[in-house]
Image: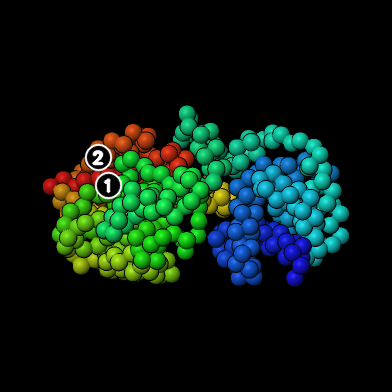
Amino acid sequence: MTAAAAGAKLRAAAARVVHAVRIEGSSLDAALAKADAGTPLTERPLLHHLCYESLRFHWQIREHIAALLSKPLARRDAIVEDLLAVGLAQLEQSRIKPHAAVTLTVEATRLLKKPKLAGLVNAVLRRSQRESFTAESDEARFNHPAWMLDQLKQDWPEHWEQIAAANNERAPMWLRVNVKKTDAQSYCRLLAAEDDTGAATADLLPGADAAVRLAAPRPVERLPGFATGEVSVQDAAAQLAAPWLLAAGGMRILDACAAPGGKTAHLSELALPGATITAIDNDADRLALVQETLTRTGGCASVLHADASAPGDWWDGQPFDRILLDAPCSASGVIRRHPDIRLLRRASDLPALAARQHALLEALWPLLAPGGKLLYVTCSVFAAENDAIVGDFLAAQADADEECLLPNNNIRDLMLKKPVGGQVLPGIRGMDGFYYACLTKSP
Ligand SMILES: C[S@@+](CC[C@H](N)C(=O)[O-])C[C@H]1O[C@@H](n2cnc3c(N)ncnc32)[C@H](O)[C@@H]1O
């Protein structure tokens, strides 16, 4: 296949991925996995880049397309609109030469079996190069669906613009070093020694002792020590959970929503002699990843396929000293990593998620030993999934108290105090958006 044919095929594949997310409601990960199967390894980074950028700037791009078209495309030609989105994303966000971007995108129109629209694609993309465009609607200016902007404005009247802007950024790659095997400073030195450009390869975050932020992302196969479990990929905000539990040797620890296992592995990497970790999840496929991660990192936990909200089915009656409830949520704090979340979530998802979160908290509380701690965590920025859940729970539960915020000053200063618990907003020191509330049970 010639380079031009391969380039056109890649644009057509990107359009299909965007279409699957926008029209069929597929997740970006699932659509990309399908597209990867037909894409040579070396071309996958560009495929991913085009899909991510098309979806990251979805609302801006769609308004731009509407301004460039003299009349909307017919429904049956929706895939061409997705191809145009891929074309515009290339022209606006990437370093591909404009001439090549246009030619290959026009050629992709034929591969998508819409040859009659090739002329239109050509005209629209060329016009976009001649005419400047300024987004007008709030949706396009901030690149979010209207309901999400409204929710952000309601929950974060002083920070919503900051959150929206952070959601449009690309997230850095964070690593967690396995402190049983190395430490963050040594790992940074190892990375620097490997790189002969003299540029900074990584930096640290005071207070998140195992966290290393890479200056540029790279595939895990190119991370020294990844295969042998010296290092794992995990955002710095997610790394706050395991140490926050202040677990000690000999304790019984429950990781109630464990998959894919980032926090389970982190717990297992803390020096806790004689502690036992039970990791459960109700998704068997995702649970397999927990075991994989533990095997790679040399960690140890009892991994159980179970429903955390029905402990009668699996609990042996022995109380846990620590419970981590990393609850299923809207993932509105990790939009930088999953730009499809903005297209896939609906306002109506929030009450349903809140009901699940509340049920999990209620079901797990009786499993906590007197004097024990339960850390409630979400990667959401919405109050309905965070302080509202924990606040209602505390009001109804006589033996539950909120413990003061994180015992680490460096990180505490980066968090925003909520009526209950604390929030790391997305983008703060490069971190994802996470909510934390630590509850203690009266002795
Ligand atoms: C935010 S993710 C957990 C991420 C994980 N703690 C980590 O650090 O890698 C939430 C998980 O909760 C699981 N889940 C949702 N409802 C559950 C339930 N009733 N019981 C157990 N797991 C559940 C989902 O399958 C999902 O894997």
Q: Is residue 4 above or below residue 377?
A: below
Q: Which mark is residue 2?
A: none
Please state the total of marks drawn on the protein image. Answer: 2
Q: Are marks 1 and 2 in contact (CB under 8 Å)?
A: yes
**What residue is shown at x 63% (from left), y 45% (from top)?**
57
Q: Is residue 427 left or right of residue 405?
A: right
x then y, percent, for residue 241: 32, 49
Give whichever of 65, 394 is nearer the camera: 65
Q: Mark 2 sits on what residue?
A: 407
Residue annotated with mark 1: 244
On-image quarter of the N terminus: bottom right
How far apart marks 1 and 2 lie (CA) works out to 7 Å
Return the residue nearer the eye: 160 or 41.
41
For image coordinates 60% across by 67% down, the residue present is 41
- Return the x and y of residue 185 as percentages of the image width and height: 33, 48
Residue at point 83%, 51% (across, down): 122
Q: Residue furthest top?
A: 158
Asked whether the viewer can see residue 218, the reply is yes
